Image: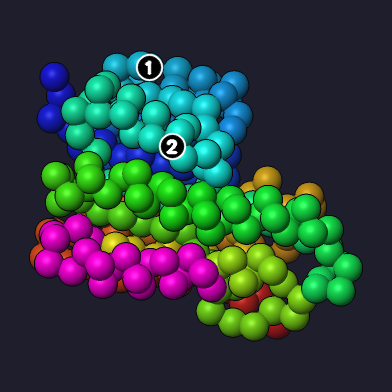
Amino acid sequence: MSNDPVMLITGASSGIGEATARAAQKAGYRLVLSARSEDKLKHLQSELGGSERVMIARCDVQSMEQQEAVVDDALATFGQIDAVFVNAGRGGEPGGFSGADHEVWKDMILTNIYGAGLTVQCCLPALRKSRGQLLLTGSAAGRTTIPGSMYSATKWAVSAIGYGVREELRGSGIRVTLIEPGMVDTPFFDEPPANALKPDDIAQAVMYAVSQPAHVDVNEILVRPTPPVE
């Protein structure tokens, strides 16, 4: 059996998750890819080395049972988990606090916060064994005030999860990294935003963090697009 490290990525079927899967594969990682869209995951699995190198799983991160099953299957398949990228998330909230659809809020909060927490909880036993690395997709929106944005509030919460779990794990050997992108051109947006980062830009930030030697803990990486030339 291969001794190559294993990276688990949630929200892996598109955008930042997909780009990170490609970058990690090039760096020699075996992959555990989960998302709601199994069809897209199947294409990625075929492209990135097949079932011997890539395990895929349809998973709604709001479900503890589904998340536990992903981790159990990953350990049964590869025997270890060395890095976990807690990346699944969603936006979409026109109307601000005055007029947003509360059901959209509910799904976003449960995905971005509760789902992230479940991924952390499910993966920690494996990361304790490997003394691995936990990475979370926060956002530049989680470091500033955006009028009317519940999405921003969820990313403030992800930052808090990162800070809190880092302190809980102090002395365990597990490294915790917050990846905080500015605007990224992903399927997250209905219309491609101008002057945005590319998913590959964020994938490279993830790979920078995981490529550091064990004594180097990259706590946070904030990545924003360069302002346009005037």
The residue that mark 2 highlights is 67
Q: How is the image coloured?
A: rainbow
Say which amino acid is labelled 2. Gln
Label 1 is placed on what type of residue?
Answer: Gly
- Residue name at image x 73 percent, y 63 percent: 194
Q: Position of residue 71 (x, y in %)?
A: 34, 34
Up/down of 156 relative to 169, above or below? below
Does 57 sit above or below residue 24? above
Cα–Cα gap, marks 1 and 2 = 22 Å
Residue 108 appears at what percent x and percent y? 66, 55
Q: Tag count in the figure?
A: 2
Numbered disc 1: secondary structure: loop
Is 61 left or right of 100, judged from the image as shown?
left
Question: Residue 12 in the image: x percent, y percent?
Answer: 50, 38
Q: Is residue 158 magenta?
A: yes
> On the image, numbered disc 1 is attached to which residue?
50
Q: Residue at x 35, y 44 (%)?
A: 122
Q: Which residues are magenta?
A: 156-175
Residue 90 in view (yes/no): yes
Residue sitting nearer the eye, 86 or 160: 160
Label 2: which secondary element:
helix
The quarter of the displayed image where residue 177 is located: bottom left
Quadrant for residue 56, please give it.
Answer: top left
Which residue ends up furthest to the front in the rendered image?
A: 65
Residue 11 in view here:
no
Q: Is residue 140 left or right of residue 204?
A: right
Assign the C terminus to one quadrant of the image: bottom right
Residue count near mark 2 (Cα–Cα under 10 Å), binned few <14, some 14–19, many ≥20: many
Disc nearer the start of the sequence (1/2): 1
